[in-house]
Amino acid sequence: MTRYVLRIWLDDRPGALGSVASRIGSVKGDLVGIEILERGAGRVIDELIVDLPNDEFVDLMVREVQEVDGVDVENVSVEPNPDRDSRLDPVLTAAAIVEQESRSGLLEELVDRLSFDFTTRWVVAFDMTENAVIAFRGNAPLRGWVEAYFRGVSSGSAYERTEPSDIALMIMPQSNVAVLMGRPDRPFRDLERSQLDALARIGDVMLESFTD
């Protein structure tokens, strides 16, 4: 059994999700988790966690789901951490942040947790006072690109709230630290960006409490 993350767009109407669940069941899939990522203009973006017997059923599942009226598949991928409960991720990250005893420890823990929680390709923490990368994970973009991006953020340009869909930005204004992350395989949605904003508020308060 392999666990998959299936992101779909569907019409915001009664019965739509039930029809999708029925199609998943018809190909021996077990729907074990549902999260609403975004809603508006009569459409909903849902992230479904599905267990399938093996890889041979993936294409069949996608075809079946797309047969439901008003449904489009945005992305399907293997869940790299099948034992996780994504509903708990932001809470566990918040707990990990407040447990840290130093500024450097907090930043290292934060980029680790964000990389895990949001299955990012890369995460970079940046000190906007010193114009310096202070922590990173994954295959981050070239340093010059990162520095240019954050210079735009710190100067108050349009970068701050118009990042591309595959990039998410956390700003901690009191400590003047920002975190940038990328995930080319699927966009960051409203729920995820709201979670990041909340974590930024917690991280900002904690960073200000340290002197190291």
Image: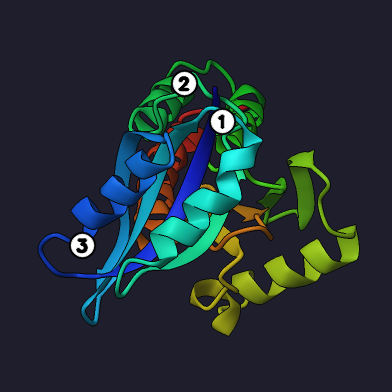
Residue indicated by mark 3? 16
Tag 2, which secondary structure? helix
Residue indicated by mark 2? 96
Rate crowding at label 3 as few (under 14), some (14 to 19) or many (20 or more) other CA atoms within 10 Å. Answer: some
Q: Are marks 2 and 1 in contact (CB under 8 Å)?
A: yes
Whole-percent x, y for residue 36 in the image? 29, 53
Residue occupying image coordinates x 61% and y 71%: 153
Number of disc labels: 3
Whole-percent x, y for residue 64 in the image? 43, 57
Residue occupying image coordinates x 69% and y 66%: 150
Closest to the observer, 19 or 96: 19
Rate crowding at label 1 as few (under 14), some (14 to 19) or many (20 or more) other CA atoms within 10 Å. Answer: many
- Figure check: 68 above or below 49: below
Residue indicated by mark 1? 113
Closest to the observer, 202 or 73: 73
User: Quadrant of the rendered structure where residue 112 is?
Assistant: top right
Amino acid carrying mark 3 in the image: Ala
